[in-house]
Image (spheres, rainbow, N blue to C red):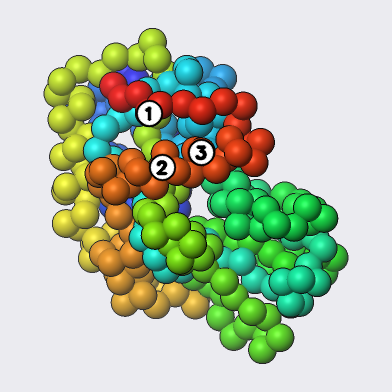
Amino acid sequence: MLRFGIHNFLNASPLLLPLKEQGANKGFQVIIDSPAVLADRLKSSDLDLAMVPSVEYFKSADSYRLVPGVCIASRGEVGTVLFLTKRPIGEIRSIAADNRSRTSVALLKILFSFRSDLSIHPFPPDLDSMLVDHSAALIIGDSAFKLSNLDSSITVYDLSEEWFRQTGKTFVHAVIAARKNICLSQSQKKFIQQVKAEGCGRVKEVVQGYKGLPGVDIEVLEDYLEKKIRYDLDEAAKDGLAHFSSLCYQHGMILKKHSIEFL
């Protein structure tokens, strides 16, 4: 039984639903955790394959191969990688960054690479607490949907939109990486592709699990999954992923350049 880690954010839910239902029959033990924790567990060989932040794949790319055709990506505004500031950009000195993901922090560093005086501090995703001692905050994932009735003094930037505005490229938030010594059978590879196709057809069912949560609009969630998130690791996504890798290397966040290697 292969240990397959997948994260617990809404954007992975269309993949998670059929994987939980059918994974055991295909030889997968499904393990759910945050993106950052999954990356650590894959690196320590506690998992065989996992959905991990794309920057974490590049940090250990020599040890991994990607499952082809599947990712979590966006092309423009996404609504779940939000930079919120109570000061003008030029006056920001410290940023509290959501401690559950690392790709978004890498993206933040790239977009703010012109500011060498910034300090970034990992923080639990609670906006009020984050802004007590910091002039800006980065909040990702489901927590971003719950940011309503913001104070008029807070300016919100969508980092996926900023990336697309500056590069014109798809941004790949997460990929499915397997340790190099792990082999998937043809039926397992085919199953993962089927999971993607089936899950994307069950969006209305997925969002019903969020019905009744305070501050969450079901129609907004459906729009997010159907129009803002992309699940295909296609040529445009691979191009965006490679460009992100080059910028991470350029800014010292990864130690060397890698070509993307697939199972």
**Label 3 to label 1, Cα distance in Å?**
12 Å
- On screen, residue 260 above or below 53: above
> Which mark sits nearer the N-terminus, 1 or 2?
2
Identify residue for label 3.
246
Residue 241 disc label: 2
Q: Residue 263 occupies which quadrant of the picture?
A: top left
Q: Is residue 130 left or right of residue 195?
A: right
Tell me which numbered mark, 3 or 1, is placed earlier along the sequence.
3
Residue at (51%, 28%) from the top-left corner?
A: 257
SS for dot 2? helix
- Neighbor class of circle 2 (other Cα within 10 Å; few <14, some 14-19, many 20+) is many
Residue lying at 57% horizontally and 25% vertically, measured from the top left: 256
Q: Are marks 1 and 2 in contact (CB under 8 Å)?
A: yes
State the residue position of label 1. Answer: 260
Which callout, 2 or 3, points to the residue nearer the camera?
3
Q: Is residue 152 left or right of residue 107?
A: right
Q: Is residue 40 visible?
A: no
Mark 1–mark 2 distance (CA, rounded to whole Å): 9 Å
- Residue in view at x 53 percent, y 72 percent: 146
Cα gap from disc 2 to disc 3, whole angstroms: 9 Å
Three-letter amino acid code of the residue under disc 1: Ile
Indicate which disc, 2 or 3, sits on the residue closer to the N terminus.
Answer: 2
Outermost residue, top side? 181
Measuring from the top left, give residue 33's x and y in whole percent.
Answer: 50, 40
> Where is the N terminus found, in terms of image quarters?
top left
- The amino acid marked with disc number 3 is Ser
